[in-house]
Amino acid sequence: ADKTSIVAAGDSAGGHIAACLVQKAQTLSTNIKGLLLFYPVLDVLDLPRGDKDAIDLEGIGNLRFPLSLPSPLNYEAGQSFLSWFWSRWVAGISAEDAHTPEAVQRLTEASPIRQLQPNFPPTLVLHGTSDGHVPISHSRAFIRKLRELRGEESGAGSDSDSDGGGADAGESSSVESEWGGSGKPTTDRLVEIGTAPHSFSLFMNAAPTEAATAGIRRWVAHLL
C-alpha cells in the first residue's frame, strides 16, 4: 500500500469518526490527502435556534423534545434528537451536565464543523436529499464553511444530481457526467443525491450509487 497517499472515509457515524480523525491529524505529521464522507454527522453541539452559529436541522434531527424526562432517558425540553442521542449515548453526558462549560467544550471539540482550519484536506461529501436521520444541512454548512476558510466562493462545489433538485432512485444521476469530462473537479465538493435516504450507499446496484462511485473515482484520481 502507498502510505504517502491516504484518503480517509466513512459513512454516517463513521463519517463523524473519519472527520474527527482528520481533524486530529492536522496537528500531526500525516499523509492524509483527502476526506470522503457519506451522510456524515458533523455537528453534535445543540445550539438554540436563532444562535448565529446554529445549523438549521432537517428531518428527525430537527425533532425537539417538548418536555424533560428523568433517567434513564434524560430528555431535556427543547433539545434536538440528534444532540440528545450523541451526548447521552455516545459521550455519556447526563442531562444535568449538558450545559456545563466542560460538556459544551467537549461537544464543540467533537463537532468537526466547529474545528475546521484552512489546511483541512480536500473533502468530498455525498448526502441524500431525503435523509431522515442526519440532516443534509450539516453537509451544506460544512462545505460552505470550508470553502470560505479557503477564500473561495461559498456557493461553489455543491451539486445536485439532476436539474431541479434531484432524481428518482431509478433515474441515472448526473454525478458521473458532471465529472466525466476533461476538466478537473472542484476540490471541496458536496454532491446531493436526489431523493436518496440515509445509508443509500448500501444499495450498490442503485443508479445514484453507481453514478456517485464513478464521481468518487474521478475525484480521488484528481487528488492523488
Image (cartoon, helix red, strand yellow):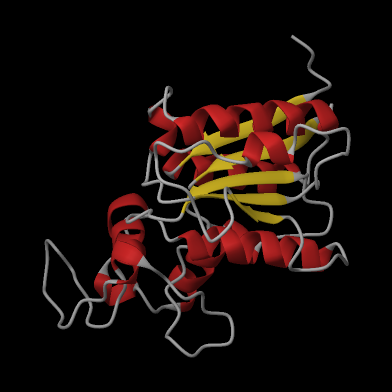
Residue sitting farthest toward the top: 1
Question: Quarter of the image holding residue 3?
Answer: top right
Image height of 30 relative to 113, above or below: above
Question: Is residue 183 left or right of 162 when viewed as pictured?
Answer: right
**Viewer can see residue 52:** yes
Which of these two is toward me, 14 or 211?
211
Image height of 47 relative to 127, above or below: below
Residue sitting farthest toward the bottom: 50
Which of these two is toward me, 38 or 180?
180
Q: Residue at x 57, y 31 (%)?
A: 211
Q: Residue at x 18, y 68 (%)?
A: 74
Image height of 110 relative to 200, above or below: below
Q: Quadrant of the N terminus?
A: top right
Q: Residue at x 52, y 62 (%)?
A: 138
Q: Position of residue 31 (x, y in %)?
A: 81, 30
Q: Position of residue 114 (x, y in %)?
A: 62, 66
Question: Quarter of the image holding residue 178?
Answer: top right
Q: Position of residue 28 (x, y in %)?
A: 79, 40
Numbered circles on residues, count: 0
Q: Residue at x 35, y 73 (%)?
A: 98
Question: Is residue 84 left or right of 204 when viewed as pictured?
Answer: left
**Viewer can see residue 106:** no
Question: Is residue 131 left or right of 84 when viewed as pictured?
Answer: right
Question: Is residue 190 left or right of 134 when viewed as pictured?
Answer: right
